Image: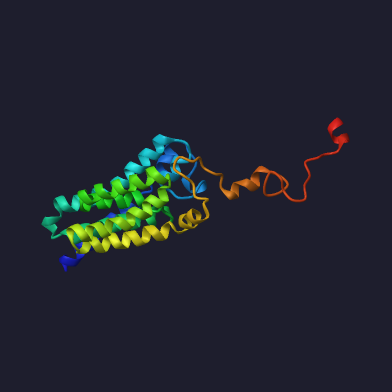
């Protein structure tokens, strides 16, 4: 019974840690708008960067990465006494990743999980994590598209793990995380194909819901049915 209970408890603990949305918390602490209300609406480091606050984006990135890395590392360091091996470490990492995607504490509306997945990979296999990070950086450097780099890295990681270190539970978790990452980037993929995807460092675009509040006559600065050419009499008054 303990052979099953401890891994499940560890996986659930990983999920709870992953459910902490640092993008939202840091934005609140620093007096910024909720990252779910502008840009892509994604509570992650890339969208926080669109607020123009680089420090908030860096903090979000590091903490999101840490919440994937730390639970896996803890299992590897102290899990042996509870019969928690490589498979349990992979399960805990998957739990943290799923917590970021569907956070318990934020109505199950989370981010895309790129930084958290990177932390999980670094915890499971530091060499694989370093190689995946390098691949991500190369794609970002040449394309300036974070979404494209993230999908490329999500595909790269399980393939490299399989080719160099062989199969096992780690590959299964990497494949599942990769599929979920690509799925969460579906909208970005469509924008990439249309040529409308935002590049790294581009400022946020106001959320569509806010635009209706900026003009009393309609849904924008030049709403249908309203003319901004008022009569001369009105001007003289």
Q: Position of residue 140 (x, y in %)?
A: 38, 45
Location of the C terminus (image quadrant) = top right
Work out whether residue 181 can be spotted. yes
Q: Position of residue 34 (x, y in %)?
A: 48, 44
Q: Nearer the viewer, residue 9 or 204?
A: 204
Q: Position of residue 82 (x, y in %)?
A: 13, 58
Q: Is residue 38 left or right of residue 78?
A: right
Residue extending farthest to the top is 236
Q: Nearer the viewer, residue 35 or 16?
A: 35
Q: Is residue 233 left or right of residue 225?
A: right
Q: Is residue 7 left or right of residue 110?
A: left
Q: Looking at the picture, does residue 93 appear above or below residue 133? A: below
Residue extending farthest to the front is 142
Location of the N terminus (image quadrant) = bottom left
Q: How is the image coloured?
A: rainbow
Residue extending farthest to the left is 81
**Occupied quadrant, residue 184:** bottom left
Residue extending farthest to the bottom is 1
Work out whether residue 12 can be spotted. no
Q: What residue is rendered at 49% in x and 50% in y?
A: 197
Q: What residue is rendered at 73% in x and 47% in y?
A: 217
Q: Position of residue 30 (x, y in %)?
A: 43, 35
Q: What residue is rendered at 19% in x and 67% in y?
A: 4
**Occupied quadrant, residue 214:** top right
């Amino acid at each position: 019974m303990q052979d099953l209970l401890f891994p499940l408890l560890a996986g659930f603990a990983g999920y709870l840690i992953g459910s902490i949305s640092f993008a939202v918390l840091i934005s609140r602490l620093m007096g910024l708008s909720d990252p779910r209300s502008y840009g892509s609406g994604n509570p992650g480091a890339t969208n926080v960067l669109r607020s123009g606050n680089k420090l908030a984006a860096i903090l979000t990135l590091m903490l999101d990465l840490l919440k994937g890395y730390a639970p896996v590392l803890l299992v590897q360091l102290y899990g042996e006494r509870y019969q928690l091996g490589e498979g349990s470490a992979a399960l805990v990492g998957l739990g943290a990743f799923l917590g970021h995607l569907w956070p318990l504490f934020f109505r199950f509306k989370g981010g895309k999980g790129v930084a958290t997945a990177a932390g999980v990979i670094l915890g499971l296999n530091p060499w694989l994590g370093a190689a995946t990070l390098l691949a991500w950086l190369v794609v970002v450097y040449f394309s300036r598209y974070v979404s494209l780099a993230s999908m490329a890295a999500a595909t790269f990681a399980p393939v490299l793990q399989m080719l160099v270190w062989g199969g096992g539970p780690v590959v299964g978790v990497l494949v599942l995380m990769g599929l979920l990452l690509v799925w969460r980037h579906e909208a970005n993929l469509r924008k990439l194909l249309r040529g409308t995807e935002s590049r790294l460092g581009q400022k946020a675009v106001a959320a569509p819901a806010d635009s209706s509040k900026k003009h009393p006559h309609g849904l924008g600065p030049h709403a249908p049915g309203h003319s901004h050419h008022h009569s001369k009499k009105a001007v003289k008054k």
